[in-house]
Amino acid sequence: MNRTFRAVFIFFCLLFTVSSFLSARGTKETNPPREQEVVIWTYDSFMSEWGPGPQIEKDFEADTGIRARFVSYGDAGTLLSRLLFDKEKADADIILGIDQNMMQKAMDTGLLESYVSPNAENLLPETVVDPDFRVIPYDYSYFAVVYDSERIPNPPKSLEDLTKPEFAQSLILMDPRTSSPGLGFLAWTKDVYGAEWLDYWQRLSPSILTIADGWSSGYGLFTSGEAPMVISYTTSPGVHLLNEQTERYQAAVFSGGHPVQIELAAILKNAKNKDGAKRFIDFMLSPAFQELIPETNWMYPVISIPLPDSFRINPKSEKTLLPNPVSDEELDEWARFVAGIKRW
C-alpha cells in the first residue's frame, strides 16, 4: 500500500468512525430511553400545526422532564381500529381521541388500565362516562351542521330539514367507520328515527355531496367551498372568528337538540412507561393542558375555567342528546346501504 493510498484510507476510516459516533449520539438524544418518554396515539388534527399537540409536547416536557411522543392515525375511528388490530402488541402508553360512542369497544378488549388521577376531582361531573376511569375525559362539544351563511341564508332547523330539495348536494358527511363525527352523526339519526333510520338516509342521500374519510378532510372540503354545509361541532364557528375575524360560518341550531361528544384518553395495561403515562393524565386534567383546548382543539374544557371571547359565537345546545352507540351490525348495514346509492 503506497503512502498516498494509505493516507486516504486512514482519512476515510477516521471519517467513518467520527460519523458513526455523531450518528449514535444524535440517535441517543432524539430517542430518549423509554422511561423518559410517553408514547401517545391520537388523531391527525390533534397534532396539526394549529392543534394542541405541539404545544402540549413542549409544556409536558418542561413540567415533568418526560417527552410526550405523539403518533397520529387519521381520525379516531382509525385510531381505534389500530388498537383493536395490535391489541397487546400496541406500542403505546396512552390512546387519546376515542369518544363515548367508541369507548365500549375499547374497554371490551381488556387493554385499558383504570387510573383515578388526583386531578379527577376537578372534572365536570357530566363528562365522567366511566366510573372506573378506564377512559378519562379531556374535552367535549356537541355535533352540529356548520353552514356558510353567505350561501345558505335559511339554515336547516332539524335533521329532517336536511332532506329538503333546496339542499341538494350541499352536505359533506364523514364515514362512521373511520371518523368520530361520522359515527356521531349516524348515532344521531338512529336516535331520532329509531327503526326507520335507513329510510331517513334514503331521503337524505340527494343532499349529500360526499362522505369523507375523516373530519380534517371533510372540513377542508367545506372551507374550500366544495359544499355549504358540513357535519362538525357547535364550537367550530369560533375558529373562523378568531383566525379570520368573520361570523360567516355558523352552527345550525336544531330544535330537537344536539348529541354531545366527550373525547377520552386511556392508559394501556401493557404500557412500557406506566408511571409516565399517569403523569401525563395528571397533566391532561390540569389548567395548563385544559387552557389550550378551547382555541386549539375547539372543544370545551372538562374542568371549570374561563372561556375565550371567540366562544361567544358558539351556540350551546339547549337539549343534550346521548344516543346509544352504533353496533357493528348497524355499521355494516349502513355501509351496504351507502354502497347501493353511492355517487360520490
Image (tube, rainbow, N blue to C red):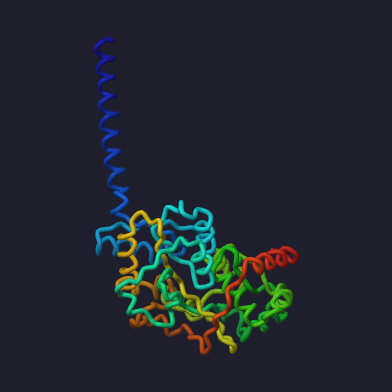
Quarter of image, res 9: top left
The residue at the point 68 percent across, 68 percent down is 334
**Residue 259 horizontal/vertical position (percent):** 54, 80
- In this view, the residue in front, 103 or 190, is 103
Q: Quadrant of the N terminus?
A: top left
The extreme right residue here reads 340
- Left or right of 136? Residue 323 is right
Is residue 18 shown above or below 339? Answer: above
Evaluate whether residue 220 shows in this view.
no
The extreme top residue here reads 2
**Residue 313 horizontal/vertical position (percent):** 46, 84
**Residue 187 horizontal/vertical position (percent):** 60, 75
**Residue 325 horizontal/vertical position (percent):** 58, 73
- Left or right of 95? Residue 285 is left
Quarter of image, res 192: bottom right
* Figure label count: 0
Evaluate whether residue 81 shows in this view.
yes
- In this view, the residue in front, 102 or 260, is 102
Q: Quadrant of the C terminus?
A: bottom right
Is residue 336 shown above or below 242? Answer: above
